[in-house]
Amino acid sequence: MFSISSAHYYLYREPTDMRKSFDGLCGLVSSRLGKDPRSGDVFIFINKQRTLAKLLKWEPGGFVLFYKRLESGTFELPITKTNAPSYSMEYSQLAMMVDGFSLKYTKKRKRF
């Protein structure tokens, strides 16, 4: 069954040409991020207008590609302080981004 449960989620910080599919996105993961696309991690790609998102993940037997197109509005990307090509996210951040929550004003409360 398809799922995006993973230990790591990486947001590619540059706008992505959404015509890219499995091979093109794997090439970005390898060449730009320096990561192994077959690691089982989830790699997140957003287009320039921030209205389309693709999530790429390796599962035993092959790659899975999730694709979301917003009917209105845009994806809010996390603010980062580095120029690294990717941003490591938590699952909760990914879920909030996809569901349309503002990441800028959301503060995680201390639990321990």
Image (cartoon, rainbow, N blue to C red):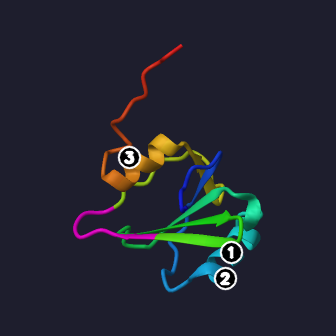
Within 10 angstroms of label 1, few (less than 14), some, or many (20 or more) residues?
many
Q: CA distance from mark 2 to mark 1?
A: 5 Å
Looking at the picture, which amino acid does disc 1 mark? Cys
Rendering coords of residue 32 (x, y %) = 71, 69
Looking at the picture, which amino acid does disc 3 mark? Met
Q: Would residue 68 be counted in the magenta stretch?
A: yes
Name the residue rendered at 71%, 65% in the picture: 60
Tag 2 near tag 1, CB within 8 Å: yes
Farthest residue, direction front = 1
List the residue tagged with mark 1: 26
Q: Which mark is residue 52?
A: none
Within 10 angstroms of label 3, few (less than 14), some, or many (20 or more) residues?
some
Rendering coords of residue 61 (x, y %) = 71, 71
Rendering coords of residue 8 (x, y %) = 64, 48
List the residue tagged with mark 2: 23
The quadrant of the image that shows the N terminus is bottom right
Name the residue rendered at 37%, 41% in the picture: 104
The image quadrant that residue 42 belongs to is bottom right
Q: Earlier in the sequence, mark 1 or mark 3?
A: 1
Magenta residues? 67-74
Label 1 secondary element: helix
Looking at the picture, which amino acid does disc 2 mark? Asp
Q: Earlier in the sequence, mark 3 or mark 2?
A: 2
List the residue tagged with mark 3: 96
**Vertical side of 90 occupied by 32: above or below:** below
Rendering coords of residue 40 (x, y %) = 69, 58
Q: Would residue 91 be counted in the magenta stretch?
A: no
Residue 94 visible in the shown view: yes
Q: CA distance from mark 3 to mark 2?
A: 28 Å
